Image: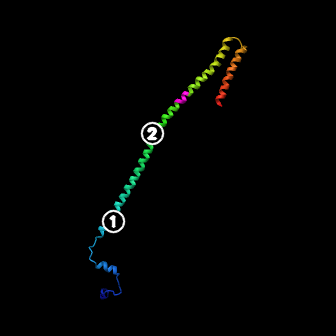
Amino acid sequence: MGASQSSAAHGEQFSPALIDSLSSRHEPVPPSSSADDIIRRRLAAEAAHIRSQEAEILHSISAALEKENLDKDKAGLNSDVLGRDIEEIRGKIERIREKKNREEEGVRLAREGVKHDHPDKPLDCWKQVDIFKTEVSKLEQAFVKSLQ
C-alpha cells in the first residue's frame, strides 16, 4: 500500500524555463528584501507626490493671499477716491445752498417790503404784491430749469 504512494509519477513534465531557473546557481534573493525595496520605492514616490501637491497648495494659497492683499490695497485707494468725491459733493451742496439763499433773498426782501409798508392793515398794496409774485415766479422758473 505505501509503496505505491512513494513511487514517482511518470506523466509529469516541467517547463524548460523552470528547469533552467532551478538548475542555475544564482544567489537567492530573499523575498522580503525585494518586497522591502518595492515598498521603499513606493513610499518615496508617494512622499514625492505629496510634496508636489503640498507645494501646489502652498502656491495657490499664497497667490490667493496676494490677490486679497492687492484687493485691500485697491480698496484703500478707493477710500481715498471716495473721500475726495464726498468733499466734491459737499462743495457742490454749499454752492447750491448759497445760490438758493441769494435767490430767496429777493423773495424775502419783497415779503419784508409788504410787511413793512402795511404792518397793521390789510394788504391792498398791489405794487408790493406784484413784486413778490414776480420774485416767486423767477424762483419757480429757475427751479424748473434746474430740473431740465
Helix, strand or loop at label 1? It is helix
- What is the x, y in percent for residue 117? 68, 11
As rendered, which of 42 and 71 lies closer to the eye? 71
User: Looking at the image, which residue is at 31% across and 79% down?
Assistant: 20
Instruction: State which quarter of the image contains the C terminus.
Output: top right
Q: Is residue 130 visible?
A: yes
Please state the extent of the stretch shown in magenta in the rendering.
Answer: 87-91
User: Looking at the image, which residue is at 45% across and 43% down?
Assistant: 68
Kindly identify the amino acid type of the residue bearing the numbered disc 2: Asp
Tag of residue 38: 1
First of labels 1, 2 by sequence position: 1
Q: Is residue 48 above or below residue 108?
A: below
Which of discs 1 and 2 lies nearer the camera? The answer is: 2
Q: Is residue 119 visible?
A: no
Binning the other alpha carbons within 10 Å of mark 1 as few (below 14), some (14 to 19) or many (20 upward) gives few
Q: Is residue 69 above or below residue 140?
A: below
